[in-house]
Image (cartoon, helix red, strand yellow):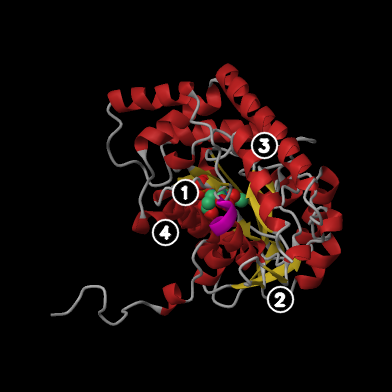
Amino acid sequence: MNNINTASSPLAERVLQMEESATIAMTQAARNLKATGADVISLSIGQPDFTTPTYIKEAAKKALDDGFTFYTPVPGFLDVREAIARKLVKENNIECTAENIAISTGAKQSIANVIMSLVNPSDEVIILTPYWVSYVEIVKFSKGKPVFVKGAIENDFKPTIEQIREAITPNTKAIMFSSPSNPTGATFNQEELEDLANLVLEYEDLYVLSDEIYEYITYEEMPVSLASIERVRDRVITINGFSKGFAMTGWRIGYICAPTSIVKACQKIQGQITSGTNAIAQKACIEALENEEAKQVAVEEMRQAYQRRRDLMKGLLDEIPNLKTIAPKGAFYLFPDVSAYLGTTTPDGEKIENTSDLCMYLLKNAHISVVTGAAFGAENNIRLSFAAADEQIVEAMRRMKEWLVKLK
Ligand code: PMP
Ligand code: GLU
């Protein structure tokens, strides 16, 4: 009899060529180890450790009681899109209306919709590197060609405008841009955005995806939205969502703000693939945005906790010999350069060839899960999330030091 699991593989090229998400894979490896009874501290997944603020949960309960259990309009409920547009006008200085908004099942789907809408086979998409893991795979899935422009640690990992200019060719369709960035936490200031806007306007058919999902999690200057610069607005697709700032990762609400032709294209794709996203979650988002008082308290409380934990983890990392770490200006990751530990040997005689080996060594021995920088286009770094309780951070850094110094 044929075994369901041993039949020959029917899988298509597009999925065979896709890399698994390293953030998700590492987090699953940590869960598996935990299931065996090990005391694992997970610093691999990028998600707030806070539960969603109560005022938002209450709004979801009300939406359920009010009967919002049906299919939703494909781009999202009109009142939710209007609330998002009001937020973008008021907080981000982006001139827009509900017509410019499409809501999706997480910002991840928003990015996929936009890339699938814009990119023809062999179009190039410039990806500022280090980058968030999924950008590259989404571009490749759409048959586009990722072109990497790498930022140096000395410049907060930010590529310069000149580097971006050098990467542009007649085939360049879009630039994947993020501020604050995952994994580096780098933010771009007004002057840098003005330069980017000017560069984009030198070309006729060049678009920027501006991923602003960490906008509420910043530690120095307030972030600026690229689309607030009027002259470039019709070339920018702003990506945002509720996962990070409102601690709503499991609710799966992301959105774009874009010229209507792009909104309609995303809507067409979504209409054939997933339809409108969850009704209850969408309705709660109106309250999330528009209950000003509750919002400010909740968002600021989480931001301050992240800032404290950033400083705590950075201080402890600095006590580990030979790591090079900068304090991120936003998001909730530290991204130390661990190259001093590459090419070493473990107490069991195994070689640490690269950061993936190092992450597996730390998981197996120190029982902490962190993500290889290779997944973000940075071979010398690892990513640690500090969206974890203070005690977990202290214990994780103690274990990390204990096991790193054993490498010879
Ligand atoms: N962009 C960045 C930079 C992220 O870190 C994430 C987190 N997964 C996303 C987009 C997608 O967020 P979500 O799908 O949860 O809205
Ligand atoms: N954005 C988070 C991360 O980078 C969530 C996991 C994912 O979707 O990749 O870890």
Secondary structure type for disc 4: helix
Q: Badge 1: few (under 14), some or many (20 or more) residues near its Cα, within 10 Å?
A: few
Callout 4 amino acid: Ile
User: Which stretch appears magenta?
Assistant: 363-368
Look at mark 4 in the image and give the residue it sits on: 269
Confirm if mark 4 falls within 8 A of ligand 1: no
Q: Residue 160: percent from the left, percent from the top?
A: 83, 60
**Residue 170, numbered circle:** 2
Residue contact between numbered discs 4 and 2, judged by CB atoms under 8 Å: no
Q: Is residue 364 magenta?
A: yes
Q: Residue 322: percent from the left, percent from the top?
A: 81, 57
In the figure, residue 297 lies in which quadrant? top right
In the figure, residue 200 lies in which quadrant? bottom right
Q: Is residue 386 above or below residue 123?
A: above
Nearest to N terminus: mark 1 or mark 4 = 1
Secondary structure type for disc 3: loop
Confirm if mark 1 falls within 8 A of ligand 2: no
Q: Residue 194: percent from the left, percent from the top?
A: 82, 49
Between marks 4 and 3, how big is the CA–CA gap? 31 Å
Q: Is residue 253 magenta?
A: no
Nearest to N terminus: mark 2 or mark 1 = 1
Nearer mark to the viewer, of 1 and 4: 1
Q: Nearer the viewer, residue 130 or 359?
A: 359
Q: Nearer the viewer, residue 267 or 129?
A: 129
Q: How many marks?
A: 4
Q: Main secondary structure of the magenta part?
A: helix
**Residue 38, numbered circle:** 1
Nearest to N terminus: mark 3 or mark 1 = 1
Q: Is residue 259 visible?
A: no
Between marks 3 and 1, how big is the CA–CA gap? 32 Å
